[in-house]
Every structure is written in C-alpha cells, then in structure tokens.
Amino acid sequence: MTKSLRARLFVGLTAVILLAGCIGGAFTYLWAFDEAIEMQDSTLIQIGSLLQNGSVKSDQSLGGVDADAEVDVTELGMAPHGSAEERLLWSHQDGLHVVSRIGQSVRVLLRTRPDGSRFAVTQLTDVRDDIASSMAIRTLLPIAALIPCLLLVAALVVAGSLRPMVRLAGDLDLRHAVDMTPLPLADTPSELHPFIASINGLLERMKLMMDQQRRFVADAAHELRTPITALSLQAENLDPADLPEQARERLGALKQGIRRTKHLLEQLLALARHEAGPNGEATVVPLDRTVKDLVADLVPEAARKGIDLGFQLIEPIAIKGEPMMVATMVRNLLDNAVRFTPQGGRVDIGVYREGKEAVVQIEDTGPGIPSGDIDRIFEPFFRGSRPAEDGIGLGLSIVNRIVDRLEGIIVLENISDRRPKGLRATVRLPAMYRSDPREESPLSISQLSRST
C-alpha cells in the first residue's frame, strides 16, 4: 500500500468519482432507455390516431414518419380473416401489446374505426430496443466526458491542497544547517498548524542544545589555552638546557603535542565563533590583498619544506563579508595545501573574477582525497582514511560554514589530468566591484615571483 498522502487522496477520489459515475451512468441509461421506449409507443399511438381519423390512408407510405423506426400498418378488416397471425391479432383488445409475428417479437397497437374496421400498427421489438439503446448511449456521453474532467480537477485540488506542505518542505531543505528560525504559520492550512508548532518546538530545543554545546566548547577551549601556553613556555625554556639525546627527543615530541593541542584549541574557538555568527559588521573585503598577505605569512613554512608556493593568476577583486571570517577561510585552505603537499611539491593559487563571482582556486601536488572520503570531508573532526601531519579535521568544516555564510560554494576535486596529481579547492563567492577598478591591474605568474 502506498504511503504517499497525495496518491492515497487521488486514488480515493478517483474511486469515488468512478463509482458514482458508474452508478449514475447505469441509472441514467435505464431511465433514458425507458423514455425512448415510451417515446416510440407514443409514435405508434400518434400514427394510430391519424389512421383512425382518416387523416392518413393505410396504403400511404409511413417512411416519412421515421424511416429507421420500421413502422408497419396492417388492415385487419371488419372480421377475423386471413392468416392465423392476423386472426390472433384480431383476438386482442385495442391498445398496445407485444406479440410474436413471423418468429419475431413485435410491439403492436390495435385500433377500431367508427365503422367497425380494425387495423394494427406494428414495430419490431429488436428495432425498438436498438433505437432506445442508441438514444440511451448518447445520453451517457456527457457523463463519460465529465469523468476525466472530474479526475483532472481532483488531481489539481489535491496538488493545490498539498502545495503548502511541499513549499514548507522546500523551505526547510534550503535552510542552512544552523538556521533554527521558527517556521511561519501564515498562509498555511489550519490542519498543518499543530504539525508546524511541533517542528518549531523541536527547532527551539535544537537551538538551545546547539547554543549550550557551542558555549561548552568555547569555554573549555578558552580555559585550556592558559595551561597549554604555560606548558609551551616551559618547554621552550628547556631548549638551552644541556639534555641527553633521549631527553631532547622526548622534548621534541612534547613540543609537537603541545603545538597540536594549541592548534586544536584555536580551531575549536574558531568553530564556536563562526557557528555563533559573525562577530563584526560585513564590509567590502579586498580578496586579492587578503590572499596575498596570507600567502606571505606561509612563505617561511613553505620554504622549510621546499614547496613552490605562488600565484598563477591574481586580479583585483572584492567581496562583502567580515574580514576575519574571510581570512580564516583562506588561511585554512592554504594551511591544508602546504601541510599535505610533500617535500619539493607545488602549490598554485588563483584569485580572479568569473562572471559575477569571485573565485579563489588553490591547487597542490599532495595525495588528494580518497574518493570514499569526498562526501564526508566537511564533517567536523573527520580526518579521512589516510590522515597525515597534525590535522584535526576541523579546518575544512570551518571553511565550509564560512562559505555558506558568505552565500558561496566550495568544491574539492582530485586532479587526475596531470602529473603529479593533487587536489584542487575552488571557492566561488558573490563578487563586488572596487570603488576604483583601475586601482590594480591583473597579475600573472610571469609578473609575480613564486613563493611571494
């Protein structure tokens, strides 16, 4: 049995319409059939009246009355004579009768003239039934044409009645994951109000739970920053000390763990901050300058790994957003590219306009993302099936949430059409024009040195 409410309503209405149409059609057919039989009896009576009054002679053609009716007139005379069937007709009283004649059923009207002579007006029953059936079927044609129209109207009514529910589902599908605003009750059927009220209550509870979770994460990360910073300083103070080789190796591992924990706390704070919403007012952000500054910050780290970091193309372009939010988004993408690119690899950056969109594209020569991890790569704390370095699985989740807030899209795809292979991250955001578009001219890789 189908679980679709629309299908169930349509099937139910279709069954009711067809049942009502069949029952109504049967009664209409019987009524029209009976009326047609009575009309033919009236025709026989009218012909009999004309013959009885002498207005029409029995030897005149009756084809003009109704050629398809096949009405015949038989003179029976003053007394019974002729064939046995004519003598049998004479034995009946005046009026309408059904008799057998020449092996066929016949409807007959007997009349007696004032002079005592009698006559019979006859019509085959089969002919009468054919005429009545034809008239009754023609009566059913409007009903037969009405049923498809009623089915179409029923489908439109069902679709229109369920349209508010479909629109409500569409609005929910288009919402961001963090949008917990209540659903509106306006312009919705009253039958849906309890359902919408229940959803709004659920959204309110989810919002409260998410706020509590964000506050807990932010408070915990903030409280842990102080002891982690103290541990980091204490570890740095041990560098000048004369330590055995084994102790210095353990000190290096301790420093790496502290750096990893510190990075985790910073990412947790960033995640909590961006889930709570923008901290500053949206302004015009020069995207090209922001990316340049962030690339310059990462040049020393890239140089230590022997990574060729630079621009393929950079154009002056601006977007609207919170500067810190935009910087965090680009920084995380660049940091991932540099971290996962092997020694001696390459990271190419492009910042350019494409139609009404500002595009930031970062390509690296790292291992890429396994095909089975692509769908989950933006989930918090998901590090994939082959994690490397000291990633914690929050960077791309933060990037994805920032891109959503900026009303853009981000696409990660493995590069397989070149050697070496790698990963391409493409962010598309609504672009704005600078106040002075001639402020800077586009720079290509030939105009901007690598690793700067």
Image: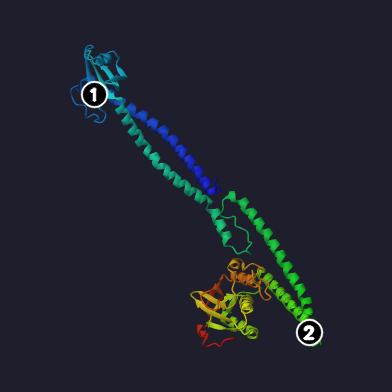
Q: Position of residue 270 (x, y in %)?
A: 68, 73
Q: Position of residue 220 (x, y in %)?
A: 75, 70
Could you say which is closer to the camera, residue 372 or residue 176?
372
Q: Give yes or no for contact between labels 2 and 1 (Cβ–Cβ under 8 Å).
A: no
Image side of residue 152 versus residue 101, left or right: right
Q: Residue 297's image quarter?
A: bottom right
Colour scheme in the image?
rainbow
The relative height of residue 359 versus residue 103 in the rendered view (above or below) is below
Residue 248 visible? The answer is yes
Residue beneath the point at 54% across and 49% down: 4
Q: Residues within 10 Å of mark 1 (few under 14, many from 20)?
A: some
Q: Which residue is the site of mark 2?
A: 245
Identify the element where label 1 is drawn: strand
The relative height of residue 308 versus residue 101 in the rendered view (above or below) is below
Mark 2 or 1: the one toward you: 2
Image side of residue 97 versus residue 215, left or right: left
Could you say which is closer to the camera, residue 395 or residue 337?
337
Identify the element where label 2 is drawn: helix
Q: Position of residue 184 (x, y in %)?
A: 60, 57
Q: Which residue is the site of mark 1?
A: 72
Give amino acid for label 1.
Asp
Residue 323 visible? The answer is no
Indicate which disc, 2 or 1, sits on the residue closer to the N terminus: 1
Q: Which mark is residue 283?
A: none
Q: Residues within 10 Å of mark 2 (few under 14, many from 20)?
A: few
Q: How many marks?
A: 2
Residue beneath the point at 69% across and 58% down: 205
